[in-house]
Image: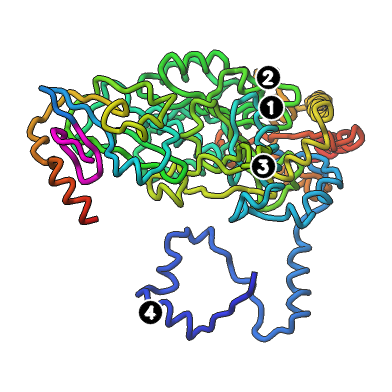
Amino acid sequence: MIPKGLLYTKDHEWTKIEGDTATIGITDHAQNQLGELTFVELPDIGKEVKQKGELAVVESSKAASDVYSPVAGKVTEVNSQLASRPEIINDDCYGAGWICKIQITDKGSIENLIDASEYEIYLKGL
Amino acid sequence: MPFIANTVQQQKQMLEEIGLTMEKLFSDIPKNLRSGSLNLPDGLPEQEVRNVLADLADKNSINLTLFLGGGFYDHFIPAAVYSIISRSEFYTAYTPYQPEVSQGTLQAIYEYQSSICRLTDMEVANASIYDGGTAMYEAMMMALRITGRNKVIIDNSVNPIYRVMIESYTRNLKIEHVLTRCETGLVDRDQILGKLDNETAAVILQNPNFFGCVDDFSDIAEAAHKKGALLIVSCYPVSLGILKTPGSMGADIVTGEGQSLGMPMSFGGPYLGFMATRMQHVRKMPGRIIGTTKDRNGKDCFVMTLQAREQHIRREKATSNICSNEALCAMTALVYLSLLGKEGLRETAQLCADKASYAFNRLTGIGGVKPYFKAKWFFNEFVLDLPKDAADVIGKLIEKGFAAGFPLSRYYPDMKNCILVCVTEKRTKQQIGMFAEALESVL
């Protein structure tokens, strides 16, 4: 089930755009591929990232993967619950398992993202 | 390991395939580091080759009385160390490829990690890396990852061999190295604090330092932390039997050369790099870590943990290219420490310090021989200022059966007459007396 209303990347991040703020997480496909998460390395608040820049690291017992930023901007908030309970991402990746919020500095970067139906087609082609 | 000969023809074929000449293939290795020819005539019988090589080997002076340290130390090794580590169950150079079926090896590494933590007063240690210099380089890279900064301050009282290694490892990386100079034997606080800023990732120090002097870096740890920088301390494990631990000074990463823990001195090793840090940094630490868990029957067992940071999974994003450890050397250190025990290690360290102190007084009683530094406290090494060129004096003492020490001018050009003398628990009062007489006779 891929929620409508969110935007996606081909690296399996999702983002929800509300005004200047982008909430960011990883998709169900991503959490499923990783398996049970054991650690999330959250970005520092204030960190500036480019689109596709390294934002966070999600680690399971079999892999550690970078989470790339879907948009360009500055980190304003992180989901600090993930520090002690990374498995929230497995349980609810589109909701309580969000990773961080970014204040978007380059609105143009949103145009490179794909919507739910495009992401679904992309997943089927994998 | 099988010996696979290749013919001149095959070599030529292989080189043609990759489009190189032999010279080009080895062009990255400086000429002075390549092995020279042994000048053996063609077609010599094996027995004669052995004789020629044995004659060459005999040119080494192997029965000298050692007053030579400088990072590697001549400690007594109980025979039980070899007996235990030579058991075939333990005799492996690396972490096994199917680690979890080798529970005994994992338990030994786990215990090794625990002993390094207790020795250094740190919270977590890795399963070991190549040697003291590599450990320091890896600690520096770890500090860069933790802080996201790229400036490091390193004092010139840190083992110069380690500094050369760091330079070589980082030549193509954008890292700003700031070298501070140790003038009195203790690191110069003004210089270090003056260079410490919000761009600094780490301050790298050594205790006892390369000149043997003993310091307490608590104040530097505090100052570094205020700027968001880390303190990396390299230490000599045997000295921790009596000295203040780097952990209690507030160090963030502790490294060192583990050779003194039961390994003989030998050209090029194999040696043992140890590395420990605080739990908060464990995911940034390179190398393997063995942890404990419960198996499906609820029994305690040992596993490799945090592997997701390693090269076989993270590829170029790995914390390091190190994907194994110095298993047999780590085992040696563990067995040595276990045989000595807490009291034994303390006694060994105390004996080293006492004998060095005796030797210092005896040697500085010789006319013209003076202590070089103002700093009073040393562990088992000290710098003497001789009335003559140190390298010449050392050469003459080799003829008299002594490895007198390390000629400091090799790395510190203005210390031409300085010699770094080391005394371990193995040296007797009589040997120290004979050494003093020999030194006096060549001055």
Q: Residue at x 54, y 25 (%)?
A: B278
Name which quarter of the figure residue B202 lies in.
Answer: top left
**B188 left or right of A30?**
right
Q: Tell me the distance, in whole angstroms, between the alpha carbons under discs 3 and 1.
A: 14 Å
| Whether residue B312 is situated above or below residue B135 in the rendered picture | below
Question: The residue under label 3 is which amino acid type?
Answer: Ile
Question: Which residue in the structure is indicated by mark 1?
Answer: B118
Chain of the residue displaying label 3: B
Of tags 1 and 4, the one toward the viewer is 1
Determine if marks 3 and 2 fall on one subunit: yes
Determine if marks 3 and 1 fall on one subunit: yes
Chain of the residue displaying label 1: B
Q: Secondary structure at mark 2?
A: loop
Name the one closer to the observer, A31 or B361: A31
Question: Which residue in the structure is indicated by mark 2?
Answer: B244
Question: Which residue in the structure is indicated by mark 3?
Answer: B109
Residue A12 located within the stretch drawn in magenta: yes
